[in-house]
Image (cartoon, helix red, strand yellow):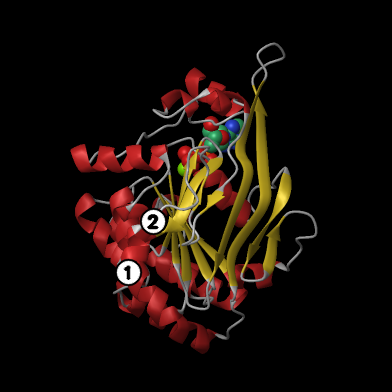
Amino acid sequence: MTIVLKTENLNKAYRFGGFINRVKINALDEVNLTVESDEPVIISLVGESGSGKTTLAKVMLRLVEPSSGRAIIYDHLVAGEGAKPSKHEFLSTVQPIFQNPFEAFSAYRTIDAYLMSTATRIKGLGRSEAEAAIEEALTSVGLKYADVLGKYPNQFSGGELQRVSIARALIPHPKMIIADEPVSMIDASLRMNIVNLFLSLKETYNTSFLYITHDLATAYYVSDYIAVMYRGTIVEFGTARGILTNPQHPYTQLLLDSIALTDRKWERTTYVASDIEAKEFQFTGCRFRNRCPLAEEICTHERPAPVVQHDGREVYCHFASSSTVTLENVG
Ligand SMILES: Nc1ncnc2c1ncn2[C@@H]1O[C@H](COP(=O)(O)OP(=O)(O)O)[C@@H](O)[C@H]1O
Ligand SMILES: [Mg+2]
């Protein structure tokens, strides 16, 4: 099977603070994820603010160097020692969509000029071919060339501009689009439109998505696989259906309960690491142990290794059973 995405012992440490109160945060701590599929897939990466989601996205997009480890997207080594794909090759493999579309485009450049340079530079197309490619990409997100011609970013709504940035990402026909919180700045009423768009683009363009979100509801709706992160570590990985119907890690269970009860989002606009959070990053054992109803002595000094269940689910908990019968299995 084709490797869609794979990380091997991926680590990223940030150091900050002064001479006395120096803090090191392992924003990615031995992250091992493997998704193999011959079909395009949508993988959601979920977790509350400060769990390391953006750091993982940035490593995959070559915006941040990992401290150690490797990352592979569609057989291309994109991060880690030896990762040197040409810029062109890289951009035609993976494309980003960011949280704030207004930051993704320069305010002083028309949208059509922007799309044109993506098509001619990255895709290497001549002008008329480029126009056709742009038209096609815009059509697939429900827009027309005439809608963008001569317009600047501030002439669009956030939802429209996010569509444009999706169209831009599609122009090189990437194997994967990495979308970091792509709907969190968009009107709640329009979010499902964008998420539905990912589903249809997966089919029409054969593009896989790494969809990063703190919104579990849309994650369940859209994804084939879900990885749950907590303080730089993966706590659970599996099929979306398996995780939704039968969460195994206490943290995933907590997340699901909190959705069911209040439909609450975890959104926090500006992110500042709290003392408690920074402390959890220093834990040698399980980082979730202080909030965990199951925690025992072993959790303070031993990092849980993944327990792999029969359906391929990986649960990073000392108390996960390797023989759990899941609904996947029964039904
Ligand atoms: N450039 C940076 N310098 C120092 N610490 C950072 C930096 N970027 C992120 N962090 C820290 O790494 C942790 C993970 O952050 P991030 O990857 O942004 O998580 P998420 O996207 O899940 O909110 C947080 O504690 C954050 O404060
Ligand atoms: Mg983030």
Q: Earlier in the sequence, mark 1 or mark 2?
A: 1
- Provide the secondary structure element on which disc 2 rests: loop
- Report, in whole angstroms, how far the alpha carbon at label 1 lies from the one at label 2: 34 Å
| Disc 1 crowd, CA 10 A, few/some/many (<14, 14-19, 20+) | some
Answer with the quarter of the image where residue 142 lies: bottom left
Position of residue 161 measured from the top left corner of the image (x, y, whole percent): 35, 60
Residue under label 2? 325
Tell me: residue 3, above or below residue 188: below
Residue at the image point whose x is 60% and y is 73% from the top: 122
Say if residue 188 shows up in the picture: yes
User: Which residue does the numbered mark 1 point to in the structure image?
Assistant: 197
In the figure, 166 relative to 71: above or below?
below
Looking at the rendered structure, the kind of residue marked 1 is Leu
Q: Is mark 2 within 8 Å of ligand 1?
A: no
Residue 199 position in % (x across, y down): 34, 70
Residue 262 lies left or right of residue 44; in this view the side is left
| Dot 1 and dot 2 residues touching (CB under 8 Å) | no
| Viewer-side residue, 104 vs 220 | 220
